[in-house]
Image (tube, rainbow, N blue to C red):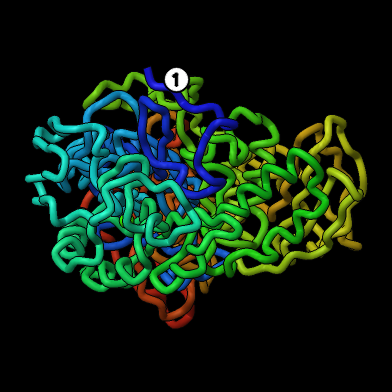
Amino acid sequence: MTQFPAESTTPDPPASGRTRRRSRLGALAAGAALALTAALGASVPSAGPATAAPPVPSTDTVSANGHGDVILNLFQWNWKSVAAECTSTIGPEGFGYVQVSPPEEHIRGTAWWTSYQPVSYKIASKLGTREEFKDMAATCKSAGVGVIADTVINHMAGADTGSGTGTGGTNYAVDSFPGVPYGYGDFNDCRSDITNYQDRYQVQNCRLSSLQDLRTGSDYVRTKIADYMNDLLDLGVSGFRIDAAKHIPASDLAAIKSKLTNPDVYWVQEVIGAAGEPIQPSEYLGTGDSFEFDYARELKSRFDGQIKDLRTIGDGKLPSAQAAVFVDNHDTERNGETMNYKWGAKYILANTFMLSWPYGSPSVFSGYKWTDKDAGAPGATATSVPDASCSNEAWTCTQRSREISGMVGFHNAVAGTPVTNWWDDGNNRIAYGRGDKGFVTLNNTGEATTRTYQTSLPAGQYCDVIASSVTECTKKYTVSDAGTFQATVPAYGALALQAATSTSDGTQTPEAGQASFTANVTTVWGQNVYVVGNLPELGSWKPASGVKMSAASYPDWTAKVGLPAGTSFEYKYVKIDENGTVTWESGGNRTATVGADGSVALHDTWRS
Ligand SMILES: [Ca+2]
């Protein structure tokens, strides 16, 4: 079967295209993306904010694309499972985007890298149908999550694969992809494999591990690629990961992007930087963001050594506003270039750092456990991948971990604040604040650490969002008038203080100058009702960030909240189960306008 070459024998130069695909001989795969899934499912109310819910990123960085929120990279999740996860977890936790694995028709086979060998641009991968993909995009959008599609546009299937039938039933052969159609002249003249990464021509015109290299300099090929990407935009995607971007001249990518119906769409490129090579990630910043591989490599070396110098991790790298950062991705978790889930507590610590440090736009990776590096997702066949399940230990479900969930919320809560009060012990313990909004400590040692920390936080009580959600707040710390607090941080553990959220208490008498909501909603035991809307005070369409209502007058649920006077806004009611499942009421968005005195009283009935 396929074997993955041992790292020491991998012929590729560090970095580069080591990636992409392949198989029997070993190659590796490549890809990149992550993704997806979805489930659309049954319990997912189709409704959601009808027109609303654009993901509104609130990040430390504002990229040239105009976005920058936290991305969850769901590697090899099928569309149905992604959709269900958007509703239950990804949206409520505060992720801005979910990156999904390539949706185009590809070669058949159980290995994951078959996703990176396109056969046609039909939305017919092993991860689901066109209809399922469209449902996923709509469901995720309703949950406030934009879908980023992993887009494989440098090449088609490997020449060594020969001919066959793709996952969508389309036949193909070497130099022949009638489903697009592409023929002999639509591939670059070099028909041999890339062997020298010091040679720009080779890297961009020859075959990456046998993958047939598209003639992206031709207008016909550019148009076919743009047609595919425009189709994905029509299906509701919010952005693109450009696979193997380093193997496509930057000017070709610019020409393709200019043909999109939304040329300003979020766009992040896989340009695997390596010192000394002629093609560098900085060349590509004219078309979008680029993944900063050196960031992930540095996280590995620091957490394997000392973390005291993490404060300089942004030095000498891509500009923060255009850097996409990650702890690992589907390639690097397999090739040893970065950390991966097998690092356990240190892996979570690295993610905690990434989500709390203001450099780049973070991507959290979530895939499945593996020993064979070629192995496809749990239960994968040559043409399908079963639904992902976080109750199945075969999936890593990084996004479900208590720490990651808390840190995504922390990231959003401290957006725009500077690093303050840096402290380190000269070795493997560090701490830092995020202005007057948060404070983090990381203990990369095998011994618990007890000490007093100096912060810039206002005196008061704070929640440790590593230990519990900010709304549950089961582990509180008190910051003194002097801005200090004492804590014991466990071995290979962390602590992240965030101000408790102030959910309104509907049992109080509504005051003048507040918006009061009363909704007649029948619920089952364990469900709560939230009012969610397009204003930040109403959670910006993220259900769990909305205003939790009181059941004191059940079946009338009540809440009050301060909203800007004179503001017109949109809102809906949602039910959230104990397990996090979100149910939107049906119909279009409700609208209202806050009075000049800041008050408005709304009396509604749940639309089932
Ligand atoms: Ca190329």
Classify residue 286 by image quadrant: bottom left
Expressed as whole percent of the image width and height from the top left, the position of residue 177 reads 12, 44
Expressed as whole percent of the image width and height from the top left, the position of residue 477 reads 80, 46
| Quadrant of image for the N terminus | top left
Q: Is residue 102 left or right of residue 430?
A: left
Classify residue 245 by image quadrant: bottom left
Residue visible at 41% across and 36% down in the picture: 29
Is residue 497 something that shows in the picture?
A: yes
**Nearer the observer, 292 or 587:** 292
Residue visible at 13% across and 56% down in the picture: 185
The amino acid on which the numbered mark 1 sits, given as a three-letter code, is Asn
Expressed as whole percent of the image width and height from the top left, the position of residue 22 reads 36, 33
**Nearer the observer, 206 or 86:** 206
Q: In this view, does 218 lie to the left or right of 112?
A: left
Q: Is residue 288 left or right of residue 411?
A: left
Expressed as whole percent of the image width and height from the top left, the position of residue 586 reads 23, 48
The number of discs equals 1
Q: In this view, does 390 lie to the left or right of 87?
A: right
Residue visible at 72% across and 44% down in the picture: 301
Q: In this rendering, is residue 396 above or below 273?
A: above
Q: Is mark 1 on a helix, strand or loop?
A: loop
| Quadrant of image for the C terminus | top left
Seen as rendered, the residue at the extreme top is 1
Q: In this rendering, is residue 397 above or below 557?
A: above
Residue visible at 72% across and 57% down in the picture: 438
Is residue 509 something that shows in the picture?
A: no
Which quarter is ligand 1 in? bottom left
| Mark 1, residue position | 392
